[in-house]
Image: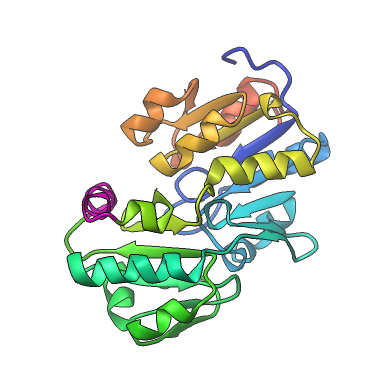
Amino acid sequence: MGGLRDVRAVVTDLDGTIIRADGTASEATVAACQALRAAGIPLVAATARTPAGIRALGGLAPLISIAVCCTGAIGYDPAADRYLWQERMPRETLAGLLDRLSAQLPEAEVAVYDGRAWFMTAAYRAVRGADHFGPRAVVERRWLPRVDACVAAVCHPDLGPPALIAALSAVGATPVAASFGQAGHRVVEVAPAGIDKASGVRRALAALDVPPECAVAFGDMPIDLPMFAAVGLGVAMADAHPEVLTAAGDSTGSVDEDGFAAWLRRERVIGAEA
């Protein structure tokens, strides 16, 4: 178990880690989460999803003790349907990001989330190719700086997230736009300064009174790397990004192989029957 002997909390990314490409969790995954609940081990979800995206998980959502949403900017209690915290991006930060994109990367498209709804350009919706969960509105780009944003999402018709992050850094957007992270295969998420999955996970574990060194985290994308550094052990899915596989202290099967449940059984965090 990579030196981690006392698992007192389980932290996991969602999409690509315990949620399959069709948006569902397998029976084995749900059973593993139920077994964690029965054992009194809290489950923390750390995700780019909003609270609406957590609610979309159906029966899995109430098994999550705390959802670290929007890559750390929002803490959400699914059982009580209440927000635990919300971080905001200063309007001047968002305005600076939008100005640099307009001047240097005009084909990049942006959506912003204010904690309740997404606001996006029509071009963003077309480039992303899929809608966000929950309320959303299509607006003209000039209206976006007026939103009190928790996070922003950036996509580009030709650049994938790693190339887009490099381009954003090259045009000087990084100091203005705070934290960047690859969220999925099309989108770069922009969070307030100092906010990432690590900050959110630490906050959630403190609320649960669990020492970080007694938590194990599962993930598959580079946006999960800060989270790995914030817990006792990081576990990569078999098909994870190469950087994640390198950084992880252990690995398990892919989401389609029920790797999450298999690891928890193998390490006896839950019973073999789960």
| Location of the C terminus (image quadrant) | top right
The answer to whether 69 is drawn above or below residue 12 in the figure is below
The stretch in magenta equals: 160-172
**Residue 78 x/y as whole percent:** 72, 60
The answer to whether 207 is drawn above or below residue 70 in the figure is above
**Residue 187 x/y as whole percent:** 35, 58
**Residue 234 x/y as whole percent:** 53, 28
The answer, for residue 186, to whether it is visible in the render is yes
Tell me: 82 left or right of 102. Answer: right
Tell me: 261 left or right of 21. Answer: right
**Residue 124 x/y as whole percent:** 31, 74
Residue under the image location 57 percent in, 14 percent down: 2
Looking at the image, which is closer to me, 200 or 127? 200
Residue under the image location 16 percent in, 61 percent down: 158
Residue 267 covered by magenta stretch = no
Picture quarter containing residue 112? Answer: bottom left
- Per the picture, the main secondary structure of the magenta-coloured stretch is helix
Tell me: 84 left or right of 111. Answer: right
* Most distant residue in the top direction: 3
| Location of the N terminus (image quadrant) | top right
Tell me: 105 left or right of 86. Answer: left
